[in-house]
């Protein structure tokens, strides 16, 4: 056998290198993220974190002990512009600060995010303050979401839930059902926006219709998460033709602006 000479070139993510730590049970966020991030010189690396089939406060709490090890499975040679933990309820239970600590310590990333942090940033950037919340889960899982929004300066005016505990079912909730829940959550005049919580919900295809029918901003976990990762990486517009909802279509800057 002979050895051929070769030259090294730049990493794939010359424009941005993103890391995504997803639940082992999630069937939606990876698909959505690749669709929203597709573009030249953008790298998206993914890893999985183990979660039991049922989402409860107890199973969520156990994820914190696995987060660093899961993030460590992302390619270590990559220079990440943003790394995200893709679980809205998980962040609300564990705490965004704890999530950020584990991701930063493990990957050395410049920025971290999660769906809760991203949703708060997106809603504030679009001037929203009184939300209708849609979640697939039971009350004990939803309650920390409400507290997180209120701690972030928003008021949860109305809550709508599917009352589901099995993650495999969450990924199969019909988008038409999600649309109807969004319209219900946003119907009250005192609601100025709707948040569709959960990275496993199939929301991208209904955001534009929901906003049109409500005349209000509608944000979802996956849409907000990808917007925030891209904004943290220096983007001022979406890199793809797929631009669901006002958040991606208008691509507001982060407030306050983040340091390069």
Image (cartoon, rainbow, N blue to C red):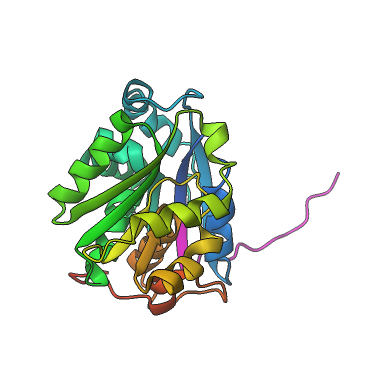
State the quadrant of the C terminus.
bottom left
Query: Which residue is drawn at the image coordinates 48% and 41% (left, top)?
Result: 22
Is residue 8 highlighted in magenta?
A: yes
For the residue pair 41 and 28, the one nearer the viewer reads as 28
Residue 227 coordinates in the image, percent (x, y): 40, 65
In the picture, measured across the screen, residue 144 lies left or right of residue 135, that is left
Instruction: Say if 96 sits above or below 236 in the image.
Output: above
Q: Is the magenta stretch mostly helix, strand or loop?
A: loop
In the picture, measured across the screen, residue 100 lies left or right of residue 212, that is left
Instruction: Say if 55 sits above or below 96 in the image.
Output: above
Residue 247 coordinates in the image, percent (x, y): 38, 70
For the residue pair 119 and 162, the one nearer the viewer reads as 162
Visible in this render: residue 80? Answer: no
Residue 145 coordinates in the image, percent (x, y): 26, 42
Query: Which residue is drawn at the image coordinates 46% and 47% (left, top)?
Result: 199
State the quadrant of the N terminus.
top right
Residue 234, quarter of picture: bottom left
Is residue 193 highlighted in magenta?
A: no
Query: Which residue is drawn at the image coordinates 55% and 69% (left, top)?
Result: 41
- Range of residues picked out in magenta: 1-18
Query: Which residue is drawn at the image coordinates 52% and 57% (left, top)?
Result: 33
Visible in this render: residue 223? Answer: yes
Q: How many marks?
A: 0
For the residue pair 7 and 94, the one nearer the viewer reads as 94
């Amino acid at each position: 056998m002979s050895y051929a000479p070769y030259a090294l070139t730049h990493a794939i993510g010359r424009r941005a290198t993103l890391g995504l730590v997803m639940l082992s049970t999630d069937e939606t966020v990876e698909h959505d993220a690749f669709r929203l991030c597709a573009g030249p010189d953008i790298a998206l690396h993914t890893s999985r974190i183990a979660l039991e089939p049922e989402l409860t406060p107890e199973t969520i709490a156990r994820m914190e002990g696995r987060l660093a090890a899961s993030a460590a499975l992302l390619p270590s040679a990559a220079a990440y512009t943003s790394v995200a933990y893709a679980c809205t309820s998980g962040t609300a239970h564990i705490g965004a600060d704890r999530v950020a600590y584990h991701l930063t310590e493990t990957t050395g990333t410049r920025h971290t995010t999660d769906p809760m942090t991203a949703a708060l940033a997106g809603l504030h950037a679009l001037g929203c303050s009184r939300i209708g919340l849609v979640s697939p889960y039971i009350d004990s899982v939803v309650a920390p979401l409400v507290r997180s929004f209120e701690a972030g300066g928003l008021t949860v005016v109305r809550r709508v839930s599917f009352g589901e505990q099995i993650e495999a079912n969450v990924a199969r909730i019909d988008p038409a059902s999600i649309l109807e829940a969004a319209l219900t959550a946003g119907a009250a005049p005192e609601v100025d926006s709707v948040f569709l919580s959960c990275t496993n919900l199939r929301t991208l295809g209904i955001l534009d219709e929901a906003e049109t029918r409500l005349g209000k901003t509608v944000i979802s976990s996956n849409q907000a998460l990808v917007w925030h990762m891209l904004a943290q990486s220096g983007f001022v517009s979406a890199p793809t033709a797929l631009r669901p909802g006002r958040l991606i279509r208008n691509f507001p800057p982060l407030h306050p602006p983040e340091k390069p």
